[in-house]
Image (cartoon, rainbow, N blue to C red):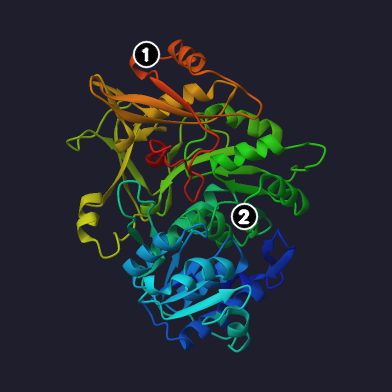
Amino acid sequence: MNISDIISGNASISPNGKAIVQGDSGRIITWLELEKMVNKLGNALTFLGVKRGDVVAIYLPNCPEFIITYFAAMKIGAIALPFNIIFKTGEISYIMNDSGAKVMVGASPELEQNVIQEREQFPGLEKIVTVGTPLKDAIDFNLLLAAASEKLEPAECSGDDVMSLVYTSGTSGKPKGAMLTHCNLMTMATYNMRILHINDQDLVYSAPPFCHIALLIAVLGPFCAGAGIVMLSHFNPEKALEVMSAYKATHVIGVPTMYIYMLNCFDSEKHDLTNLRLAFSAGGPMPPQYIEEIEEKFGLSFCEQYGLTETTSIVTYNRMGHRRIGSVGVPVCGIAVKVVDMDGNDLAPHHVGEILVKGPGNCKGYWKTPEATEKAFSGEWFRTGDLGTFDEDGYLYIVDRLKDMIVCSGYNVYPREVEDIIYANTKVSEVAVVGAEDPIRQEIPVAYVRLKDSQEMTEQELIDFCSARMASYKVPRRIIFVDEMPKGPTGKILKRELLAV
């Protein structure tokens, strides 16, 4: 088993079909061209000394070279380690040193600033390959490919071999590398293909950063179906609408923040989205009031899903025609999900507890961290750390993160519930509710709010709005208005940073 077989299979069936469209430049790469470039880089990495089981770091924006490097590493039996292009030296060096990566393929400007100029922080890094302007003490990507053979047999891998390390966001400490296997990726890519209703005639606009587990939905799922993808190096809502219109995209995959921004930019006179059939949202909950607006304005079906890095993405999803707003849908066929109390006992519908997952997507564990692996798994069940509840029909509802839950005067306050109510205020663009220490109540809810452009609101006005719609202990005691929210790689609001604002 080798997941790079996806590329070879598509190249043999549809050699001239579109595999990648780079929306920024209009560059188009066919399946045959992609296969040849993957083979060339695989041979080049081998020449540089990369062996089976070695880690290859990828420090690139969404671009063809990212995908080429990802599949080339896996084709030779190495392990792909993606980084977010916005990471700085300290974030990169911790993960590089933890993973033991000796080779990095990256974008010239970011490499020069955060790696080459800070080389002493990367003692184990032996080779640097640059995409873009050639840099001193680094190898040029294009020259490397030019000298390599375009023929390469894939390494024979078992389904249990690790093929990618994806480091968690570190919301509860230092990031940990989830070990994803060829079986994890191949199985879940197949599931994603079916969930998204994709075929080889489709073209998918893939918006999330490829450094995230969303790559499975945004790239591997479409590729598994033989569908091509349209990408931008960096997300821009106006440009996203333009490329979807220009290339007649049939699907769009993004995170909630991206959809909200696209809604604000959408103009039916300028943007023709009539070919779009499905919008798929991952990476966090979509405020319910936006879903119907997205479907109405874009003329498509909206599908929200729930998944984690450690489960190789999708766990549950809302099926087309059977969506329930507020729910993340039903478990994917072949994946078991249960909600348990603090003692691990199964809970009945409408009772809130921790969500546990068992299935072929569960990662092999955390890289070189057996203690963390043991803590995260209960037998075959992965402990998500998320709080949720099922309804009587088996639809899952995410209540909050277990660690985000606020205990106020002995009552449990779930920030997600408070946020959904605040989002109902038409002046609010973004909100995040966190717990702040309080000498009397233990904790109190505090709401950080970004208003829509040109809107004004007082703290008391929003508190009164909340008081009319929720129990008093849930009402935020403080409202802090901000111009921007701190966000992670996928656009998810970083609540741990808010109290420092």
Determine if residue 332 is in view. no
Residue in view at x 34 percent, y 72 percent: 100
**Distance between mark 1 and mark 2 Cα atoms:** 41 Å
Q: Are marks 1 and 2 in contact (CB under 8 Å)?
A: no
Task: Estimate how packed mark 1 is, as few (under 14), some (14 to 19) or many (20 or more) residues with alpha carbons within 10 Å.
Answer: few
Image quadrant where one finds the N terminus? bottom left
Q: Position of residue 15 (x, y in %)?
A: 68, 73
Left/right of residue 46 with respect to residue 496 in the rendered view: right
Front position in the image: 440 or 255: 440
Q: Quadrant of residue 142?
A: bottom right
Residue at the outermost right position: 269
Above or below, 156 against 436 in this view is below
Front position in the image: 429 or 260: 429
* Residue at the disc numbered 1: 471
Task: Estimate how packed mark 2 is, as few (under 14), some (14 to 19) or many (20 or more) residues with alpha carbons within 10 Å.
Answer: some
Determine if residue 53 is in view. yes
Above or below, 355 against 104 in this view is above
Image quadrant where one finds the C terminus? top left
Type of residue at label 2?
Answer: His
Above or below, 321 against 54 in this view is above
